[in-house]
Image (tube, grey):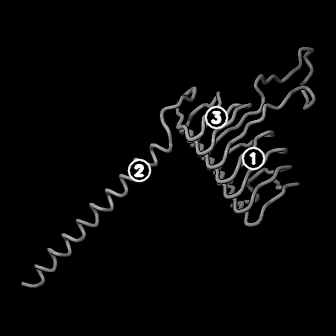
Amino acid sequence: MPITNVHLGKGVVVTHPRLVNIYGCSIGADTKIGPFVEIQKNSSIGKRCKVSSHSFICEGVTIEDEVFVGHGVMFTNDIMPRAATSDGELKTEDDWTIAPTLVRRGASIGSNATIMGGIVIGHGAMIGAGAVVTKNVPDHAIVVGVPARVIGDCRERSETDRRARANTSTVAARRNRDFTESNTRLNAR
């Protein structure tokens, strides 16, 4: 499979270049592309992104910097797909309009999510694995399900996680200190 007519930024890593189909697009610096990925013409991937294996990024998709795309993520760009025109002729590129999709900086898209064309995924948003995203996703929203629905805010989760990590670190430090003191007393005997 080819990598043709692609603008690759400095430090881009395509882990298995013979196992991708990437053409007519741009990929920003320090981005990592996994195997079995297709990135079509007129799409753009920002800097410091990660696109995991078996993902499909079609024409009209713009992915900003620092976005994570999980395994098997599928983007679409045609809201009303049909193989043939009303006259029964096989459709060509001239017979359809691309519905552009924008994934804002820092978003994360879980494995096997499907992203319908014509939407915006907000800055720092998180898409759950297997979600089908049919509507715009607000900045920092956490969405899951079919169709995807908002269940939370990443900023709230981040603060909760930070507190949990701080508490865990404090508990671990206390246990380590208690263990050290206990060991010191045992060794002194």
At horizontal 68% and vertical 42% (from top left) the residue drawn is 103
Q: Residue 38 has which mark?
A: 1
Badge 3: how crowded within 10 Å, few (<14), some, or many (20+)? Answer: many
Q: Are marks 1 and 2 in contact (CB under 8 Å)?
A: no
Image height check: is 120 above or below 82?
below
Residue 88 locus on image (x, y percent): 90, 16
Crowd band around label 1 with a 10 angstrom C-alpha radius: few (<14), some (14–19), many (20+): many
- Residue at horizontal 90%, vertical 24%? 90
Q: Residue at x 52, y 31 (%)?
A: 150
On screen, residue 140 versus residue 81, left or right, reads: left
> What x and y, as percent, mark residue 64?
71, 48
> In the image as oriented, which residue stretches furthest toward the top?
86
Q: In the drawing, does residue 91 fall left or right of residue 132?
A: right
* Amino acid type, callout 3: Thr
Q: Find the residue positioned furthest to the left.
A: 189
The residue tagged 2 is 161
Q: Identify residue type, mark 1.
A: Glu
Sequence-first tag of 1 and 2: 1
Check disc 3 and report the residue beneath it. Answer: 114
- Going from the N terminus, do you reach mark 3 or mark 1 first? 1
Mark 1–mark 2 distance (CA, rounded to whole Å): 34 Å
Q: Nearer the viewer, mark 3 or mark 2?
A: 2
Secondary structure under the numbered disc 3 in the rendered image? strand
